[in-house]
Image (spheres, grey):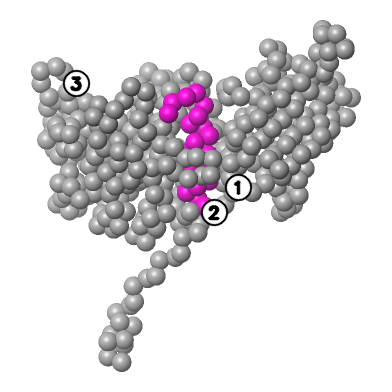
Amino acid sequence: MLLERDLIQSVGFRNVTEGGRVTGFQFRVRMPSYRGMAASLIDGIAVRVGNVVDVGPHVPLWTFGGQTYTLQQLWESNGVRWPLEEAAVVTVPFDGGLPQGVHELSIELRLRMSYIPVEHQPTIHQVSRKVTLGPEGGDGAFRYGVSLYSFMGDYGTVMDLETALAAVADVGATGVEILGEGHIPNYPEPSPAWLDTWFGLLDKYSLEPTNYGSWIDTRLHPGRSMTVTEGAAALQRDLRLANQLGFGFVRPKIGVVSGDLVPDPIWTESVERSLDLAHELGIIICPEIHSPTPIRHPVVEDYINLIERTGTKNFGLLIDTGIFQDRPIPLRAGETRESRPAFLDGIGVDPADFADVAQYVVFIQAKFHDINEQLEDQQIPWLPVLKALKDSGYSGYLSSEYEGERDPWRAIEQVRRQHALIRRVASELPCPVPPPSEENSHAKRTS
């Protein structure tokens, strides 16, 4: 498992509960030196959180290897070490804990370096970082997950599989999405050792596989499109692999033939040829409705027609919440409105349109681009979106899909902010009023 570059880590910032009472909060700190050292060389850590908390270096507790110590106990210890590759867990006693949201956490970490003259000791590391306190309850009507696509750019460079899954679990999510050819070494034939690692980490972090992203690359060969047989083979290959990894949904990204993402005509028969296999494996195939395709569109009608015509339970819709974007994504360096796709300004689908297709929707990717320090999404209107989902009876996964700036480690904090935001909004939604029963309706009409 890899660590974030900042001394203060995003993952692990949470309130601490003992005996049903919140007694403080904790966070993780990376060793700032170029080597690990004996924990007895720690001279304390002063902690400040905005104007709420301000404690001296002797107050916080330290946890190494699952064992918690006071600073005095660390000074008296032998054999307790702070390894370079392991974050220390710092616990600050604070009755009632911190409120949910983004906090400015400041530390003054003091270490004694024996090879530096005593008059220049302790060595002091002063850093501050804005970090989001992870969600605690407030789940509302939905289940919560994260797509590892959120971490692309980080993944394979500053983040490995365990680091990613630990970040997912740390926000209280229970589901994880992957991209087959993005996250599986030696795709499409992972090694037995990797499979053991995959299932071991799912168990360690109490996560379940949700949606597996695959591709039908219809323009795989120059000069010709895939045949139906080739398209079905590509889809079936990934259905089998998704099943091997424990997934219940497969999202095929099908090659398109137009700017509004009309899929290649081979999609229909390629999918129909795969429905029996999907049924055998217990998987639902779910192409995504992705901007610039709105809900009310021939593409969506064609997908629904397949469901109605075949009566299949193994094909459904995946909604990407980017279709509800109603404010533009800021221009990047060198970009102009004319040089980039117009849908990046948002196509502003009315969330009320979700009711038209709700019965066919099996999974939702909670696409977002930027959430500020006040936990305000800059592009997606979550209150009407989540209200529309709940009112329509959707109670499945909201799977975070961050697609904002790819600065290293930014995605970890952005995912934390999204979960704090959408879970708070969801918890505050009123329960939908059920329609009156036929008996009651009749009574009202005849009274």
The residue identified by callout 2 is 138
The residue identified by callout 1 is 100
- Indicate the secondary structure of the residue bearing disc 3: loop
Q: Which mark is first along the chain, 3 or 2?
A: 2
The answer to which of 389 and 417 lies nearer the viewer is 417
Is residue 351 at all visible to an observer of this figure?
yes
Q: Comparing marks 3 and 1, which lies closer to the viewer?
A: 1
- Indicate the secondary structure of the residue bearing disc 1: loop
* Residue 201 percent across, percent down from the top left: 53, 31
Please identify the quadrant where the C terminus is shown. bottom left
Locate residue 141: give its quadrant: bottom left
The 10 Å Cα crowd at callout 1, few under 14, some 14 to 19, many 20 or more, is some
Query: Label 2, label 3: how many angstroms apart (C-alpha)?
Result: 45 Å
Residue 291 in the image: above or below residue 73: below
Residue 12 in the image: above or below residue 33: below
Q: How many marks?
A: 3
Check if mark 3's residue and mark 1's residue have beta carbons within 8 Å.
no
* Residue 161 percent across, percent down from the top left: 49, 26
Q: Identify residue type, mark 2.
A: Gly
Magenta segment: does it hold 369? Answer: no
Query: Label 3, label 1: how many angstroms apart (C-alpha)?
Result: 48 Å
Query: Label 2, label 1: how many angstroms apart (C-alpha)?
Result: 11 Å
The residue identified by callout 3 is 220
Query: For the magenta stretch, what is the residue range?
Result: 405-424
Label at residue 313: none
Q: Comparing marks 2 and 1, which lies closer to the viewer?
A: 1
